[in-house]
Image (cartoon, coloured by chain):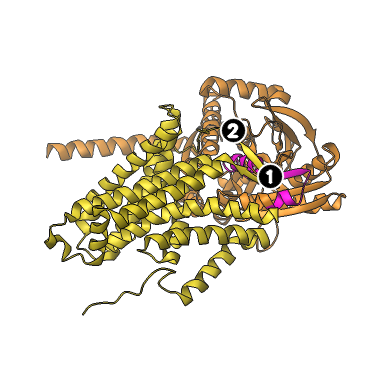
Amino acid sequence: MKRFLIFILFLSLCFASCRKFEENTISVGVVAEITGDMPAVGASCTNAAKMAVKEANDAGGFVFDGKKYSVKLFIEDNAGKADQSASAAQKLIAQNNVVAIVGPNASRYAIPASEIAESSKVVLITPWSTNPKTTLDARTNKPKQYVFRACFIDPFQGKVLAKFAFEQLKTQKAAVLYDVASEYNKGIAEIFRDTFNQIGGQLVAFESYTTNDKDFSAQLTKIKRSSPDILFLPNYYSEVPLQVQQAHRLGLNVPVLGSDSWGSPELLTLCGGDCEGYYFSTHYSPESATPEAKKFIQNYQAMYGKAPDDVAALTYDSFGLLWTAMKNAKGPDRVSIRDALAKLSGYNGVTGTMQFKEGSGDPIKSCVIVQVKEGKFSFFANANP
Amino acid sequence: MSYFFQQSLNALQLGSIYALIALGYTMVYGILRMINFAHGDLFMVGAFFCFLAATVLHFPFLPTLLVSMAGVAFLGVIIERLAYKPLRQAPRVSAVITALGVGIFLENLILAIDPYPKHVPLLIGNTTWDLLGVSVSSLQVLIIALSLGLMLMLDFIVRRTMVGIAMRAISWDKTIVPLMGVPVNLVISITFALGAGLGAAAGTMYGLAYPVIDPYMGIMVGWKAFISAVVGGIGNIRGAMIGGFILGTVEILVVAYFPSTYKDFVSFALLLVLLIYRPYGILGKPQTQKI
């Protein structure tokens, strides 16, 4: 009986505190790749999210109709699975009643989650998903109303890289090796191929593999036979080191070009010295940082003891966009926040100035080319198509 | 022509790894008539043991290989005792489901400890030679030689030693053999130890050849090795070796002469055709049921 009474007391306390808490909070969700094949991405995303929420709450939260609201953050793991990304988004929307979701980051997880957000009419901002399909409705081919992103899109990146290879690196013959089972890799590889051919280069090999393959010797031998000047690997940081090492073992020693999926410090650990001198396009470089970016880098370093990578910066910007929209919104509800976000103009973030294209969730912004130099990422050039 | 030889060498490397793992499936099946789906994950644990021995204990190559093999062999025996032995009289489906569960358990155990992909250091100096346009690396030679050596050793154990005779006897008739005084449990444990140890050797060499390892690496490789075992005739040790080399060769050569997008589609279609004509695998024999 005593135990039962304590239990009731505990329950009532909990309910009382919960109710009090809920009156003045706005819930925001994060879906991230905490476990699965890209845990470094998930860690950066959740780190930056916690930091952004803490800063917003320290600054006094948000005021709607004279009432003060603080932000409550809910973090869900998608375990590196497409179905779990959708169910995590569903859980945040139905159970935690969030007004907006940030994440998932990789396109193959962001696309299913964005479908849920769109149909439930909840804002979803993906920090890092660059595939056009994330913000496009597959049936109508029109932009989704509730899905936004803080990064550039693949056609842009593919074009920039093809031009960079042809004009700045002066290469004539390019080869591509990409993951045919992943939306991101495939999309960017195809745009690179088309652009490179269009501007006068020659694409000599276009080879593919499927996710979780570790042996690329057959494809790389084939690529070597076509004697390219440059190899393009638009693949994730956990696969690129294997591809580069196997290429070297087969005697294929041409410069290698990559996309923003390379931009994790993990790449440097996994590569050893094998990625030295190679280039990739990314969202920002700490070396070309604006004052806003410098402040963010400092705070992040102080809080987590390491430099933020591009996912951290983009997650922080996604929250920055969301906070600005919430300040401008009429009320703390999903529709008002969505409307305020779509109208946003000239937001000055860590990864540059951005503004959403008319009627779309894709921002207009530029990208940087980074080179791996002495075991570090160093700024090489700013690039626009 | 050098292109063909280069691709054949690639195929030999991939095939020898498939063959080593396939042996684990085939040995357990031969004795217990059960498919140990956790075997791919034991292979993964082998790669992680190799990583630990190389980075934490700073062992050179040979001790690393032995530590990994011994550790996983022990793990294999423990798993058999705890998870499979209680189910020895249960329907085979239950045992297979248990094996799947053990595999998922191992993956998530490593995930829970540390989900980051790991970089396995190169434990032996790797030089690449150019032989008439074919790049041959010392690592490749080591992998192929070591796999062949281990396979010959296993073949010897199974054919020439008392333990091997006991294994084959149990595989032949499980009810009579214990009456002859053969310690069945011990022999089954040794079988698991041998199979798991070979899986770990494959894991170690895989870790050296493809030095980024993660907790999910065993799933796809495990499936492919299982398919190799079936193609060779599951339960037959020489068949598993042949099956591994066939699958490796088909996979590499399909990419070499077709668009690489067709890789899995064409290679698995070929294997399906093979199984239609030889449903018991290349060296497998149809089983007759005694009534």
Percent position of residue A242, x then y: 59, 42
Percent position of residue B276, x then y: 47, 76
Of all chains in the rendering, the one displayed in yellow is B
- Residue A11 colored magenta? no
Task: Look at 42% across and 52% down and name the residue there.
Answer: B21
Residue behind mark 2: A312
- Is residue B16 found left or right of A144 in the rendered image? left
Percent position of residue A128, x then y: 62, 41
Of all chains in the rendering, the one displayed in orange is A
Near mark 1 (Cα within 10 A), the count class, few <14, some 14-19 or many ≥20, is many
Near mark 2 (Cα within 10 A), the count class, few <14, some 14-19 or many ≥20, is many
Q: Nearer the viewer, residue B3 or B42?
A: B3
Task: Look at 16% across and 66% down and name the residue there.
Answer: B175
* SS at circle 2: helix
- Is residue A8 found left or right of A134 in the rendered image? left
Nearer the observer: mark 1 or 2; the answer is 2
- Is residue A302 found left or right of B175 in the rendered image? right
- Mark 1 or 2 closer to N-term? 2
Disc 1 to disc 2, how far (Cα)? Answer: 23 Å
Task: Look at the image and tell me whether residue A136 can be seen.
Answer: no
Percent position of residue B127, x then y: 61, 36
**Residue type indicated by callout 2:** Ala
Residue range of the region highlighted in magenta in the rendering: A222-249
- Residue A247 colored magenta? yes
Residue behind mark 1: A342
Image quarter in which the N terminus of chain A is found: top left
